[in-house]
Amino acid sequence: TALELYSELDGTLLLPSNRWQCDRKYLQDADPFVCTNFPEPRRPPHYNFHEDLQLSEQIAGVHKVLEAPLKLEECALQLSPGGNYLDLESSLAEQRDDLEQLYRDVAQGKKPILILRTQLSVRVHSILEKLYNSHGPELRRSLFSLKQLFQDDKDLVPEFVNSDGLTCFIKVGAEADHNYQNYILRGGW
């Protein structure tokens, strides 16, 4: 475990230059159509990230402390606010250029929030599976929900397109009546 130092003046935690503290939450979003988009827990515990260690070496600790109901091998870390996903194969120091606002916030004493959530590729696979295997009202609800899903996470659209999501739309639209084609046009884009 890392050494924690406290100020003699006011008892606040002093962090070595290679560590910073953040609040952490998780988002149960393995099934994007059931996700509430309210990260848990409401009062997040603090976590000290080591700036020089790969995030893949630290994510298991975050997962354990949060007792998140997510599969560890399917987890990603997303910065809030801003929505940037962190590269788990790199350290925070290696991503410093991409995280300028995060470092400014930490320097100003703010605690960023990192959200443990399901990787984009897993969520997109779940969406595609749902669209391919749904019919009738369930398909209509799924198509209608897509617009909100895409608005909630800006990175979901490119991942959906790269995973042959447009081919899925074409196939689903060709097999359904014209009302479903309207849902595809309104919901997807």
Image: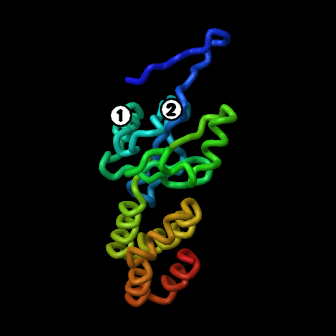
Closer-to-camera residue (112/36)? 112
Which residue does the image show at 45% across and 88% down from the upper left? 177
Amino acid under disc 1: Lys
Q: Is residue 28 visible?
A: no
Indicate which disc, 2 or 1, sits on the residue closer to the N terminus.
Answer: 2
Closer-to-camera residue (25/90)? 90
- 98 is higher (above) or lower (below) than 181: above
Residue tagged by mark 1? Answer: 64
Name the quadrant of the C terminus.
bottom right
- 172 is higher (above) or lower (below) than 149: below
Say left or right for 107 vs 177: right
Name the quadrant of the N terminus.
top left
Residue 38, position in %: x, y? 54, 46
Which residue does the image show at 58% across and 50% down from the upper left? 99
**Residue that extends furthest to the top in the rendered view of this protein:** 8
Residue 15, position in %: x, y? 55, 25
Where residue 19 is drawn, which disc sits there? 2
Q: Mark 2: few, some, or many residues within 10 Å (few <14, many ≥20)?
A: some
Say left or right for 52 vs 185: left
